[in-house]
Amino acid sequence: MTEEKAPEEVDVNGKEEVKSSHEMNYDTKELEAIVQEMALLEQARMSGNPQESINFERTRGECLRDHLKTKEAILEKASSFKEKANRLFENKEYAIALKGYLTGLWLMREDRLPFPVVLTDSGPTPRGVAETIEIGIEKCASGQVTDLEDTFEILRCQLLSNASASCLQLCDLDAAEALAFEAHTRRPSPKTALRFAKALEAKSEYKEAERALQPFNDNAVVRRELLTLRQRRDEAKAKFSQIFTTTPAVASTLEKVEIHHSGKEEQVGNENIEEKPTTIKKKKKRSRARKKPLYPESEQQARRAEARKEADQVRTTPNVINLAELDDQDREAKIQEISQAQDRMERDAMALSRISASDALTLQKMRQDGATQTELARFYASARDTEAQRVGALMTDEEKIKFKTIADMPGVTNDQLDLCFDAIRQAVDVRNPPMGNNRIIVEETKEYITNNDSTTSTVKNEISHSLQAYKEKDDHKKQSSPLLHLARHILGFYLYPMRPGRNQSQR
């Protein structure tokens, strides 16, 4: 997909040579007072006080009225941010381009007050008040500005779509999917469908991507993309099926035996196993007289229900053992059994901690679904390899030397190597938290907006407040997508990382 070309006269550095006519200079002390008041009112609004919420919206409307008086001014400012971001995207400066797209979306936020509106505590504005206030209310009341709504929606979808492309380049797949889905939901078109499909394809959700493109099958570009998706889906399916082509003999070996290659390699494959023809002997049917049931049908059903109830009660009731009532030999055996069970639980917890959180959840789900030990062992080995590759790519030279020194020591065990690797992995995670590059982008966004002369003071204040709220929020560490979390603050509406009708098990 090709990005929109930005006009050549746009300044790439993010600064306009001539200030727009709708930007007015504020007195510094007055601006500081309003900013401080808005911060206090924001705290009161978050506490759920309706009266303070009304005061907050009134103060906010007064600030915006002195900067961007009309929707034309907002549209012009957001368009300039999009054009500059497009130029940056073409230069492969995806992080800075994303900041420009998010800032443009903030300007077009749906819950902001683009016109000087009089808010009262009792309800609607009284009749005749439009004659005593600024011309912006008259334009809003007469509906002259409604012609721009379609232009607003087109620009908003373009910004959402381009922000999705930036997140895709930054490998933030959740944010890319959510932003593309929002754009496609607001204004479905072949272009938004293609962008949405690209985000889904990056997450290997080929069927969902095909489903998004199917309504626009009459478009030539969409048809080509559908063919490409089907080819990649078939390739992924073929590659996935190769994992399970192992013979039963090798599968049992993976589960029970640890193969050590010394000297000559042993080749175990399908060609080394001779398939012997099996003959099926037909058993002769014996005619047996049907035995008469011991109990009537109704009594049998009642007995089965009672047995199931007792079995459920035994399964759910904890087995409490009084060790004092046991003799020395039984007590010793029971203590040893409990100790072994605790050791198994600790080993399982340690094993799960050595793979990624998503792989650990998948492994637990496989256990609940009744997967065999061979399947669990194969999946765990693959997850360990993936985690080892991730940590190895982020290890420093000093850490690599230390690990190699310990690995080369005579008599070192696998448990000792695992403990050493765990310590290095913890140090790597401290230096490189999940989505580390994107967290840097979140921190830099405040500096970018503050240094941009074409951004109004009110915009700077509110976006800075959103960034501060993001930074201070405790649960941001649990987010898999920091950029998505930041977008929720700036855009003023919640972007769902999962589409309606789909649960986590379907992903």
Image (cartoon, rainbow, N blue to C red):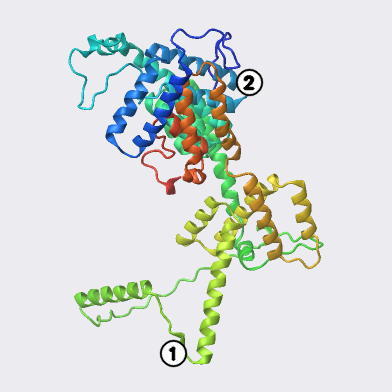
Disc 2 versus disc 1: distance between alpha carbons? Answer: 78 Å
Q: Residue 164 versus residue 378: which sits nearer the camera?
A: 164
Which badge, 2 or 1, is on the more N-terminal residue? 2
Res 278 visible: no
Contact (Cβ within 8 Å) of mark 2 with mark 1 = no
Q: Residue 414 versus residue 193: which sits nearer the camera?
A: 414
In which quarter of the view is residue 277 placed? Answer: bottom right
Q: What residue do we see at 41% from left, 21% from top?
A: 108
Circle 2 Cα neighbour tier, 10 Å, few/some/many (<14 / 14–19 / ≥20): few
Expressed as whole percent of the image width and height from the top left, the position of residue 494 reads 40, 35
Q: Residue 371 versus residue 138: which sits nearer the camera?
A: 138
Q: What residue do we see at 50% from left, 14% from top?
A: 80
Q: Secondary structure at mark 1?
A: helix
Quarter of the rendering occupied by the N terminus: top right
Furthest-bottom residue in this view: 327
Expressed as whole percent of the image width and height from the top left, the position of residue 205 reads 49, 39
Vertical relation: 78 (above or below) 47: above
Vertical relation: 49 (above or below) 356: above
Vertical relation: 13 (above or below) 244: above
Expressed as whole percent of the image width and height from the top left, the position of residue 238 reads 57, 44
Q: Which numbered marker is on residue 325? A: 1
Q: Which residue is mark 2?
A: 91
Circle 1 Cα neighbour tier, 10 Å, few/some/many (<14 / 14–19 / ≥20): few
Q: What residue do we see at 63% from left, 51% from top?
A: 387
Vertical relation: 24 (above or below) 409: above
Furthest-front residue in this view: 29
Res 262 visible: yes
